Image (spheres, rainbow, N blue to C red):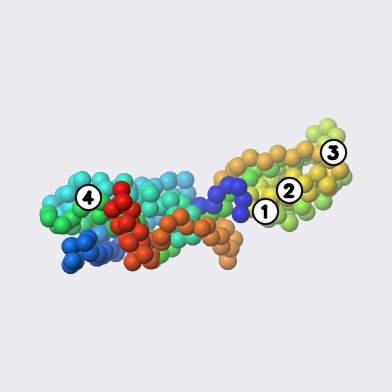
Amino acid sequence: MSALPARGRGGGALLARVFRVEHDRGLGKLAHVRVFSGSIEPLPRGSGLVYESKASPARLLYRYQNHVETAVPEALQQGLHGWEVTDLKVTLLDGEHHHVHTHPLDFFVCTPMAIMDGLKNCGTTLLEPILRVRAVFDPALAGRVIGLLQGMRGVLLEQGVRGEKQVLNAEVPAAESMELPVEFAKLTGGRGSISTVFSHYAPCPPGFTAERERIGANPLDRAKYILEKRNALTAG
């Protein structure tokens, strides 16, 4: 994988689910069932995360709604494949709390499970970083340089001759560009110049996957995740 991180973006149709989380808070019995009703929907690329709450404070107090809002961005730092998820809208539609058993930290535990469950059901699109490449070289090598870039899934944007040099602009996936400076130097005999700069993110090719090792338990493994979080909260 490249030095630049991949990303995921929300995908699929509007999703509305009820997320139920049950666990024993050391009272020897089920303390309470936290209930979330929410939706996840994709937004245009570059929109980032948009959060909205439509939950009634009579059913879910504002302070608990604030806990959900705070936990959502953190939950999206590691999506289905371990990458940050962006360009989506998360809406809290409804919820409930118990006036005795609900703990302020419960929603920090429940929200990541709700988010991951929603992402699993609506799906995400894996994005890869794209570099803008500018190359200057002997015009006689134009065909070979273009072939080098195309072999790295590069897309030619424009080219032309300036003085005695060929100038070429292209876009190349960062994951394919690791050997580009070395291969370009070999091809030109060290008599050309090449520069790269981050341009944008674009969807990965069909069938392409890139998994990032997850830090901590996966919220989709609810039993393990709850145990880990409960131990962390107790230790804290």
Percent x, y of residue 32 = 18, 62
Q: Are the two marked residues, 4 and 1, in contact with CB atoms closer than 8 angstroms? A: no
In the displayed orientation, state which residue is furthest to the front: 235
Q: Which residue is mark 4?
A: 104
Quadrant for residue 151, please give it. Answer: bottom right
Give the amino acid type for the residue marked by disc 4 in the picture.
Pro
For the residue carrying disc 1, how many other residues have a C-alpha within 10 Å: few (<14), some (14-19), or many (20+)? some
Give the amino acid type for the residue marked by disc 2 in the picture.
Leu
Residue in view at x 63 percent, y 53 percent? 175
Q: Which residue is mark 3?
A: 191
Sequence-earlier tag: 3 or 2? 2
Percent x, y of residue 41 = 37, 56
Residue 180: image tag: 2
**SS class, disc 2:** helix
How far apart are the two marked residues, 3 and 2, measured between alpha carbons?
Answer: 15 Å
How far apart are the two marked residues, 4 and 3, measured between alpha carbons?
Answer: 64 Å
Q: Is residue 41 visible?
A: yes
In the picture, measured across the screen, residue 56 lies left or right of residue 159, that is left
Sequence-earlier tag: 4 or 1? 4
Q: Which residue is mark 1?
A: 176
In the picture, measured across the screen, residue 206 lies left or right of residue 194, that is left
Q: Is residue 37 above or below residue 68?
A: below
Percent x, y of residue 23 = 25, 64
Q: Is residue 15 visible?
A: no
* 31 vs 123, nearest the viewer: 31
User: How many numbered badges does the structure rendering display?
Assistant: 4
How far apart are the two marked residues, 3 and 1, measured between alpha carbons?
Answer: 23 Å
**SS class, disc 1:** helix
Q: Are the two marked residues, 3 and 2, in contact with CB atoms closer than 8 angstroms? A: no
